[in-house]
Amino acid sequence: MNLDNNPFKYDAANNLTDKMIADYYIDDFNYSRFIQSKRNIFLVGERGSGKTMALLFNSWRIQKLLAEKREEEPSLSTIGIYIPCNTPLIQKAEYQLLDDEFLGSVLSEHFLVLSIAQVLTETLAEIPHVLDGADESLLRSETNFVLGSELPEKTSFFDAIKLFLQRELLTTQRTINSGKRATFYENTFSFASVFIPILNMCANKIPQLKDSHFLFMLDDAQALNEHQVRAMNSWIAYRDHSLFSFKVAVAKVGTPTKITSSGGSILEGHDYTTIDLEASLQNKKTDFYQLAERIVKRRLKNISVSASPKEFFPVSTSMEKDLKASEKAVREEAIRKFGEANKNPKAVTDYIYKYKRAHYFKSRSSKANRPPYSGFETLVFLSTGVIRNLIEPCFWMFDSVVSEATKMKDEQGSEIISCIPPAIQTKVILERSRRTWDWVRNSIANDIEDCSMEDGLRAFQLLDALAVHFRYRLLNYLAEPRALSFTISKRDQDIMDELNHLIEILQKAQLLYVRSGPAKSEGRRETYYVPNRILWPDRGLDPHGQHARVSIPSDILWTAAKTGKIDLKYLPKDKQMELWNAEQ
């Protein structure tokens, strides 16, 4: 085993090698069937939820690599074109120099089209023998006529188109810089003038591509300017999906509008399908838990470790013992309350589920150290349903084991790691939790856009007040004692304007996740808020939590942000109980 090869590297997917993406990605749970379909898809999730990895995995170059590993010919039925939107070319701001908004929109689409067209031609040029059976001279002639180009003769067809696009970019830049802005739009490109002709040419004049469907996969589409977003939506509204479809990855913060260039709208279910890559549930029965198991198992296999994730990340024996004692005590309590388990099994089972872990935390001495947080299941809960949040602590745990040289030798004398000892798991979890709190307290205003010093203080104070609130529930056996998420009730519009700004900052900082779930009343759905669970170990909370939400009025939350306290003294007693005992 090469101990320098940490299997839990969690760099941005764009920075991983093709081989690492092919080796690490688990496609069963990540909606590849949707991405490979002819439907338009929006992938939604915050950073680290797997959007980029999902798109890259379905790109042509990765699918080609996977086919080669299987010793198969790569399929051309779908061709994934990966287009990052946070590039200097797409984000060029020259459109702001134009006084005419229409001309600005034309220029914005022009830069976007040039960028996508370059990636398209690069991808097609990578396909082996793609022009077999095609009349290349006819292709050049038609391309010159349709695009008004003069393709260089001594360069391969798709490389020649790429050179032409690069020249067009340079010409556009010089025209804009020269001040002759009134004439620039005469030669700009649009979706209809570039993509439709090229794709029709591929389908009708290139035998290898006659049955191909092109997947235009736009990553970080929230980085597009308003004109480019409207242009993209207009393309998505295009009714004929036989040749191409769009797969668009966006963050929840700053999600683009769905308005088209003509002022119309694209509608979910009609024009596109939305897939949320963040998982709201993380217990053993959920898809996310199974996905987490498979991700970790595959990464361990890549360094020749055969242990299961639960074996590699064992639970502290002392915590396991104490939890069993708490379960026994709570079972006896439930039987006294509801009668023998065989008489009222559901009531007893529900009571044990709700209170056994709360009993463990409540029964710990106030002078005791923090609980020995450990075990694979704990890591899954700490992730808050985001893959990168799962992988990051695993990386530091593995690194810590290597640093402390707690190694074994295999039969050949090579160094191996059979597991991450619970003590190291606890140390890393607490360290990452403390570092997160320190960052919120000291640096969030410097690192997050549109976050003033006052905003940063309020962000810290709100999270701090929530931590105190949740701990009070945990230690005082209130209803749903392990609730770690909340809803906002009694929404005052003026207060919500202030709160929403703070919530957006916390979302950008990945300290708060905004999700949707069923409400208690009349089958409705409601928005609820889940703080990143890596915050809770430093405060002695149980990251396992439960699927329950605390209802908190907007004015109390805003007061908490300003003062650092959830103060209920001014509310009538019955209203206090409504807050503290809210069960969802």
Image (spheres, rainbow, N blue to C red):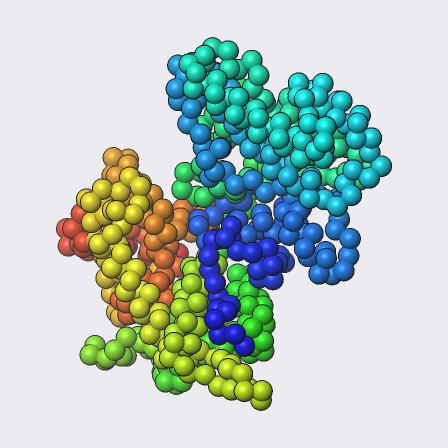
The residue located at (58%, 47%) in the rendering is 55
Q: Can residue 474 be seen here? A: no
Residue 521 coordinates in the image, percent (x, y): 43, 48
Query: In this view of the protein, which residue sits in the foreground, 333 or 146?
Result: 146
Q: Which residue is drawn at 85% across and 37% down?
A: 133
Residue 500 in the image: x percent, y percent?
31, 41
The residue positioned 82% from the left and 30% from the top of the image is 135
User: Looking at the image, which residue sits at the far bottom?
Assistant: 411
Q: In this view, does 465 lie above or below 174?
A: below
**Quadrant housing residue 434:** bottom left
Query: Measured from the top left, where is residue 579 in percent x and y?
Result: 27, 55
Which sits in the foreground, 574 or 438? 438
Seen in the picture, residue 301 relative to 68 is either above or below; the reply is below
Quadrant holding the C terminus: bottom left
Q: Nearer the viewer, residue 329 or 234?
A: 234
Q: Is residue 533 visible?
A: yes
Q: Is 65 situated above or below 366?
A: above
